[in-house]
Amino acid sequence: MDSDTNTQLKVKKEIHTKQMQYINPEEVKNWTLQQIKEKYKPIQEEDFLLNEAIISEFRIGLYNFFNEKERKKPITIKEITWEKDQNTNYTIWYRKELNQWVFIDSFIWDKNSEF
């Protein structure tokens, strides 16, 4: 029996296979998450806790936005990826503040990259 099951945030991960259209990072840079998702369908979406997640090379840039003390806290991060074009993806990270998802950082990366 896992006693931590009830206290831990369940990681939510969704994979979307149908793409409505490619996202334009310049167009959406000042949009809210809701506005972006209304126009562009993500190909992947995941929620995780900063203090429990594996911070690979892909996510290491998040550490530029959180001090050492914050990195040890269960801060919920939303990571969403869209297709930018045939060869490139665009990922945005958000954190929840006052019941709203607030932009942290974004990353444009080659679909063939391995992290």
Image: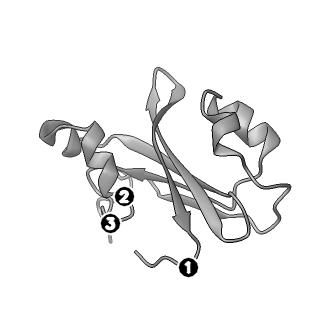
Q: Are marks 2 and 3 in contact (CB under 8 Å)?
A: yes
**Residue tagged 3:** 57
Q: Is residue 110 above or below residue 39?
A: below
Q: Earlier in the sequence, mark 1 or mark 3?
A: 3
Q: Residue at x 61, y 27 (%)?
A: 30
Assign the N terminus to one quadrant of the image.
bottom left
* Residue 52 picture location, percent across and down: 29, 57
Q: Read off the residue under disc 2.
A: 59
Q: Quadrant of residue 34?
A: top right
Residue 5 picture location, percent across and down: 37, 60
Dot 2 alpha-carbon crowd within 10 angstroms: few under 14, some 14 to 19, many 20 or more? some
* Of pointers 2 and 1, the one earlier in the residue sequence: 2
**In-front residue for pair 91/9:** 91
Disc 1: which residue: 112
Badge 3 amino acid: Glu
In front: label 1 or label 3: 1
The answer for how far apart the CA atoms under marks 1 and 3 are is 15 Å
Q: Assess disc 1: are there few (<14), some (14-19) or many (≥20) residues with their C-alpha within 10 Å of its C-alpha.
A: few
Question: In terms of depth relative to the viewer, which is nearer, 13 or 86?
Answer: 86
Vertical arrangement, residue 103 with respect to residue 8, above or below: above
